[in-house]
């Protein structure tokens, strides 16, 4: 462990590393603009953009399940890496909106034909991808696994109240994946990380169960399964993010002796452009080094970080060797940060 309890990877000679090799993404075909939403709720393009930076969001159609999007993103990442599905040891799916509450990752494993891989879901809402990436790192660095796919995917359009203008304008659907593999400590791409939770503030952002009961026998009832739409205290979530995200990233920089000026990119969960701007200002990071695609996709929850990474890798902004400060934050409340180095495909 490093300074302030930060886990610093590669701190001993025998520690293996994790290399970030490749990425891929998948998006629903339908894009819904702010102007289109204003036809349903009392809002406007100007109102949404000035408060969030969002201009449009993707909404999954009847044939575009979460399983399908996650599988498409996984296939794209495998192709980018030059791997076959049989090369995988682990598939981690970060999602809060599975197609099956018993788990959607095994469906993705089956669709890929990744017969050698164990697959399971990890639920941590908007922190999910970063938490899953760190979790995968522990398997790879321990030597128990060699190659993994970390997928972030959410379909929150199914849980949005489309008559609530405070939430329906924020969320979109999408999926993205990152291929990672074990590597020598000297090539490690997970340089440091920190994960935090504060359940005392869980009520700030919820997708809660409904309380409806169904009769079973005389004097016996059982809860009828179901969930209420997303509810959020926007002001509290904003204050939480602009306070905790800079704090956790500062701990990582101090623990690793890294100056903010040494960072090539700031890659945060894409929730609100004002949050991205506030964190960048805290570390004096110029806007051209802040990765943002909020205008096109909105908040895709666990998918935002890998979706943005895939876009920046494919258009040539993120290059092998680049140093990235990343943070996920949201419901739980949960948050975390990681210093990452992009490796790119090998060979």
Image: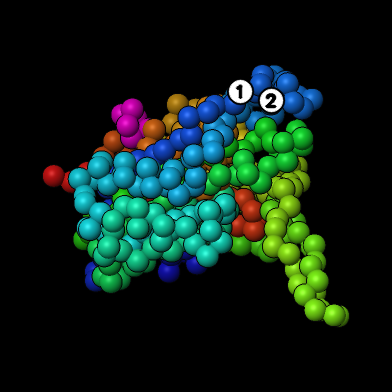
Residue at 70% from the left image edge and 55% from the top image edge: 227
Residue 60 inside the magenta-drawn segment: no
Q: Which residue is tagged 2?
A: 37
The residue lying at 61 percent from left, 23 percent from top is 33
Percent x, y of residue 305: 47, 43
Q: Are marks 2 and 1 in contact (CB under 8 Å)?
A: yes
Q: Tell me what residue is drawn at x 35 percent, y 58 percent.
A: 110
Identified at 57% across, 52% down, the residue is: 97
Residue at which label 1 appears = 33
Q: Single out the residue that lies furthest toward the right.
A: 219
Tell me the magenta residue range: 312-317
Quarter of the image where the C terminus is located: top left
Q: Quadrant of residue 299?
A: top right
Q: CA distance from mark 2 to mark 1?
A: 7 Å
- Number of residues whose C-alpha sits closer than 10 Å to that of mark 1, classed few (under 14), some (14–19) or many (20 or more): some
Q: Does residue 23 sit above or below 134 in this rendering? A: above
> How far from the left and from the top, in percent, is residue 311?
39, 33
Residue 109 in percent (x, y) is at 35, 58
In the rendered picture of this protein, how many numbered marks are placed on residues? 2
- Callout 2: helix, strand or loop? helix
């Amino acid at each position: 462990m490093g300074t302030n309890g930060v886990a610093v990877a590669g701190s001993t000679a025998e520690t293996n590393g994790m290399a970030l090799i490749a990425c891929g993404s998948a998006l629903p075909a339908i894009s819904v603009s702010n102007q289109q939403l204003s036809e349903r709720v009392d809002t406007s393009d100007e109102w949404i953009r000035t408060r969030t930076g969002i201009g449009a969001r993707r909404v999954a159609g009847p044939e575009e399940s979460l399983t399908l999007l996650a599988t498409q993103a996984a296939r794209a990442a495998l192709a980018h890496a030059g791997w076959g599905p049989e090369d995988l040891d682990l598939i981690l799916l970060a999602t809060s909106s599975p197609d099956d509450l018993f788990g959607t990752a095994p469906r993705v494993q089956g669709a890929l034909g990744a017969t050698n891989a164990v697959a399971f879901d990890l639920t941590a809402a908007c922190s999910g991808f970063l938490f899953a990436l760190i979790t995968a790192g522990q398997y790879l660095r321990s030597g128990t696994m060699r190659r993994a796919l970390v997928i972030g995917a959410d379909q929150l359009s199914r849980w949005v109240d489309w008559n609530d203008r405070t939430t329906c304008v924020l969320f979109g659907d999408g999926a993205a994946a990152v291929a990672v593999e074990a590597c020598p400590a000297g090539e490690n791409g997970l340089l440091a990380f920190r994960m935090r939770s504060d359940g005392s503030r869980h009520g700030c952002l919820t997708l809660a169960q409904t309380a409806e009961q169904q009769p079973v026998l005389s004097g016996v009832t059982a809860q009828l399964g179901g969930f209420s739409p997303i509810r959020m205290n926007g002001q509290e979530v904003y204050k939480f993010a602009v306070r905790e995200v800079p704090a956790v990233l500062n701990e990582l920089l101090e623990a690793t002796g890294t100056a903010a000026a040494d960072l090539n990119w700031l890659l945060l969960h894409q929730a609100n452009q004002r949050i991205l701007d506030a964190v960048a200002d805290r570390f004096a990071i110029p806007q051209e080094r802040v990765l943002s695609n909020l205008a096109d996709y909105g908040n895709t929850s666990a998918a935002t970080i890998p979706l943005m990474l895939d876009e920046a890798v494919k258009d040539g902004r993120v290059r092998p060797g680049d140093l990235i400060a990343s943070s996920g934050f949201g419901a739980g409340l949960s948050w975390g940060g990681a210093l990452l180095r992009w490796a790119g495909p090998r060979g």
